[in-house]
Image: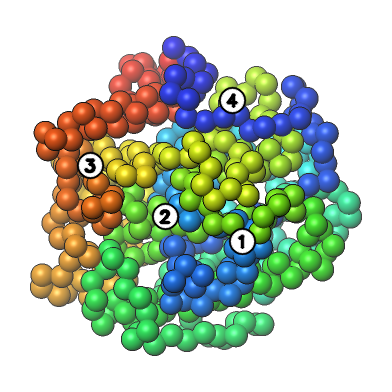
């Protein structure tokens, strides 16, 4: 079986992006449609409009003027791998971005992968990236311009917004695809970049006493102090989004621009980032289309970051080239459901994880439905690694330095050493700690989810699945 057959396989997990493009060039008949993709770095599902304690008035307003997907899930909780899904519409185990791109980790996309910047350029779009890219190689992400190139510690959200505005105004009537990759609220050497004032940003300082302790963390002073710093970074991010949206309005291009806001992975705390449990994948996702009828929709559709690229391509009226080996993409456009609170058929998402850093290998695959989550740990004899920035965090030091401390309801031992299969009833156990995989009463359910995951892995060409590659490493 060849790779195309696998990707077009039998499980029906996705649809090709809807389009009006010509077959060979991807040239759209609808060129007056811009795309603004905004990517936060390590923001969990923390919004004041969703009963959070952090102040996010701009993001709240964006949700009120568009659609907030309350059940949006990343496909992987690791920065480069997650961003690669946004750029390619492929899972990271398909596109080759198995772990982090920078430094010695050095993961990159496979040579035959096509990206959003490339496909939209073929359709006549001007393309630009502002801020963080974190995906390799540059040759496969041929943005026309890279403004405020990523560098350690970049936090100047006003500079990023103004550079984005200058570029948008310079495009005239040419349709554009603009990606803005913020660095907030990722940690840096000084924790969250909160050691100085930033231009045009009102600083929000939080008391450790006022933070909300997520269910995956213990209530310890060090954790509270750490969360207060994280909150400040999220509020700075919110201000940056406000400046950026103001620039969009001033450019005159807002009426024909699809705005998408999301985060790449879970908050940078133990039990979230770098994990496929709920806190690592359940993230903000907002879309605002000039064509949607309803505003302020809160959609309960179970959607995935695998759907983001097909959504942007559908908006632009572009499909991958007819001879593209990865077509059709496994996701589906979310444009048809922006006005619907409970659209049918959106009840399952898949996730994958292989590496974070090069020495942090723990391959996992999962499927999540409205009622259950199932995890397959491919190398259960290994110890689950902890991302370096999390290891150095005040939260991790407080937890590991406190006898008997847990990650919420989960012991450190249970977190570090997992069985080959995990099955959780999300209605009774939303924290995913009571493993039902060995219970005879759930044997039929386990078998069904096991089959669903296997079929998805085959259809998406998972190299970790037996039979996908031959003994010489060639794809079937």
Q: CA distance from mark 4 to mark 3?
A: 32 Å
- Above or below: residue 476 compared with residue 440: above
Q: Residue furthest right?
A: 172
User: Circle 2 sits on which residue?
Assistant: 282
| Category of crowding for the residue at label 4, using alpha-carbon neighbours closer than 10 angstroms: few (below 14), some (14–19), many (at least 20) | some
Between label 1 and label 4, give the one nearer the viewer. 1
Q: Residues within 10 Å of mark 1 (few under 14, many from 20)?
A: some
- Mark before the other along the chain sequence, 3 or 2: 2
Q: Secondary structure at mark 4?
A: loop
**Disc 1 element:** loop
Q: Position of residue 401 (x, y in %)?
A: 16, 74
Q: Is residue 75 left or right of residue 125?
A: left
Is disc 2 placed on a helix, strand or loop? loop
| Marks 1 and 2 in Cβ contact (< 8 Å) | no
Give how far across and how far down residue 394 sits, in percent: 30, 75
Residue 296: assigned label? 1
Mark nearer the viewer, 4 or 2: 2
Q: Which of the two residues, 83 or 474, is positioned nearer the viewer here? A: 83
Around disc 3, counting alpha carbons within 10 Å, would you say few (fewer than 14), some (14 to 19), or many (20 or more)? many
Mark 3 lies on residue: 423
Using the image, tell me which numbered label, if any, was put on residue 327: 4
Mark count: 4
Disc 4 or disc 3, which is closer to the eye? 3
On the rendered structure, is 214 left or right of 67? left
Determine the secondary structure under disc 3: strand
Q: CA distance from mark 1 to mark 2?
A: 20 Å
**Residue drawn at (69%, 72%), measured in percent from left and top?**
243
Of mark 1 and mark 4, the one earlier in the sequence is 1
Which of the marked residues, 1 or 3, is nearer the chain's N terminus?
1
């Amino acid at each position: 079986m060849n790779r195309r057959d696998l990707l077009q396989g039998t499980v029906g997990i996705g649809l090709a992006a809807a389009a009006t493009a010509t077959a060979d060039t991807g040239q759209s008949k609808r060129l007056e449609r811009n795309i603004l993709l905004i990517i936060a770095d390590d923001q969990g599902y923390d919004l004041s409009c969703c009963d959070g304690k952090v102040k996010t008035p701009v993001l709240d307003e964006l949700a009120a003027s568009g659609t907030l997907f309350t059940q949006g899930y990343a496909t992987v909780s690791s920065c480069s791998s997650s961003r690669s899904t946004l750029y390619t519409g492929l899972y990271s185990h398909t596109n080759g971005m198995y772990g982090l791109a920078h430094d010695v980790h050095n993961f990159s996309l496979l040579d035959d992968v096509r990206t959003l910047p490339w496909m939209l350029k073929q359709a006549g779009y001007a393309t630009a990236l502002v801020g963080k890219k974190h995906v390799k190689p540059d040759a496969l992400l041929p943005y026309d311009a890279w403004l405020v190139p990523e560098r350690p510690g970049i936090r100047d959200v006003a500079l990023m917004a103004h550079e984005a505005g200058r570029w948008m105004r310079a495009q005239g009537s040419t349709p554009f695809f603009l990606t803005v990759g913020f660095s907030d609220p990722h940690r840096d050497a000084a924790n969250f970049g909160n050691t100085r004032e930033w231009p045009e940003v009102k600083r929000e300082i939080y008391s450790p006493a006022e933070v909300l302790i997520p269910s995956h963390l213990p209530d310890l002073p060090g954790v509270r102090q750490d969360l207060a710093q994280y909150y400040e970074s999220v509020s700075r991010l919110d201000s940056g989004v406000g400046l950026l949206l103001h620039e969009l309005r001033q450019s005159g291009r807002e009426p024909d621009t699809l705005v998408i806001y999301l985060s790449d992975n879970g908050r940078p705390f133990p039990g979230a980032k770098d994990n496929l449990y709920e806190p690592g994948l359940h993230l903000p996702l907002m879309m605002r289309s000039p064509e949607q009828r309803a505003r302020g929709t809160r959609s309960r559709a179970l959607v995935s970051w695998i759907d983001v690229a097909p959504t942007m391509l559908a908006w632009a009226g572009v499909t991958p080239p007819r001879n593209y080996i990865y077509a059709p993409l496994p996701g589906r456009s979310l444009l048809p459901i922006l006005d619907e609170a409970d659209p049918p058929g959106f009840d399952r998402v898949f996730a994958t994880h292989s590496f974070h850093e090069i020495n942090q290998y723990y391959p996992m695959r999962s499927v999540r439905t409205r009622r259950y989550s199932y995890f397959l740990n491919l190398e259960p004899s290994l110890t689950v690694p902890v991302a370096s920035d999390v290891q150095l965090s005040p939260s991790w030091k407080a937890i590991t330095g406190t006898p008997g401390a847990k990650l919420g309801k989960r012991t450190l031992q249970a977190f570090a050493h997992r069985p080959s299969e995990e099955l959780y009833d999300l209605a009774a156990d939303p924290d995913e700690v009571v493993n039902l995989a060995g219970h005879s009463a759930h044997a039929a359910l386990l078998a069904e989810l096991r089959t669903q995951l296997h079929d998805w892995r085959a259809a998406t060409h998972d190299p970790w699945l037996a039979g996908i590659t031959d003994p010489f490493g060639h794809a079937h």
